[in-house]
Image (cartoon, grey):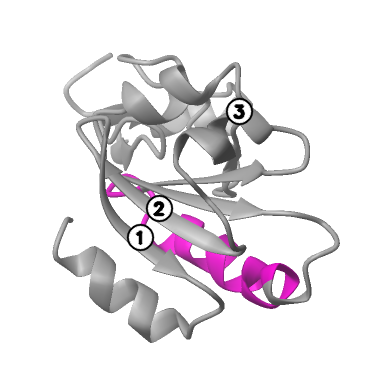
């Protein structure tokens, strides 16, 4: 890459690493990936789906703080906060990893963290649960609680 090439710095939504992405490569249709974790950088910023099997990889080993939405498809309050969780994934990309775990399909993780009511939002840092928000709550309250850890 020449010194005169344009490049934009893109923060990885999964690990937070800064990546230089040459503008000419984007124009040619190349799909950039993170140099550290190989996550596609052009992927839309949606919550990452976590399962019992992927929990350790996606949550406990994350270099970023993690917001984990414990939910179920039949739960009305879960469906109420789903758009908020979606917005937070985009707004906090590169600073907080936003994830979702369906408690009906993944009962081991829900049981491990003693989740008795949904929606439950768990906040993890360095693989440890550091905060818990139970029930549907406004976006501003969720952001207020997360600001302490970001």
Residue 31 in the magenta stretch? The answer is no
Please provide percent x and percent y for residue 9.
Answer: 27, 39
Quadrant housing the C terminus: bottom left
Name the residue beneath numbered marker 1: 132
Residue 19 placement: quadrant: top left
Q: Is residue 13 above or below residue 51?
A: below
Residue 87 in the magenta stretch? The answer is yes
Q: Secondary structure at mark 2?
A: strand
Foreground disc of the pair 3, 2: 3
Sequence-first disc among 1 and 3: 3
* Between 144 and 122, the one nearer to me in the picture: 122
Please provide percent x and percent y for residue 54.
Answer: 55, 19
Q: Residue at x 41, y 40 (%)?
A: 13
Is residue 68 in view?
yes
Spatial CA span between label 1 and label 2: 5 Å
- Residue 33 placement, left or right of 94: right
* Between 25 and 97, the one nearer to me in the picture: 97
Name the residue beneath numbered marker 3: 108
């Amino acid at each position: 890459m020449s010194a005169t090439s344009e490049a934009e710095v893109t923060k990885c939504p999964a690990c937070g690493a800064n990546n230089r992405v040459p503008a000419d490569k984007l124009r040619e249709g190349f799909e950039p990936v993170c140099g550290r974790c190989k996550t596609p950088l052009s992927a839309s910023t949606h919550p990452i789906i976590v399962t019992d099997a992927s929990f350790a990889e996606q949550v406990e080993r994350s270099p970023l703080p993690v917001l984990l939405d414990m939910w179920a498809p039949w739960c009305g309050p879960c469906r109420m906060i789903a758009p908020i969780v979606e917005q937070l994934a985009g707004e906090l990309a590169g600073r907080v990893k936003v994830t979702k775990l369906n408690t009906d399909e993944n009962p081991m993780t829900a049981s491990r963290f003693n989740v008795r009511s949904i929606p439950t939002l768990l906040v993890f840092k360095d693989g440890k649960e550091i905060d818990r928000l139970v029930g549907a709550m406004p976006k501003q309250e969720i952001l207020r609680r997360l600001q302490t850890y970001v």
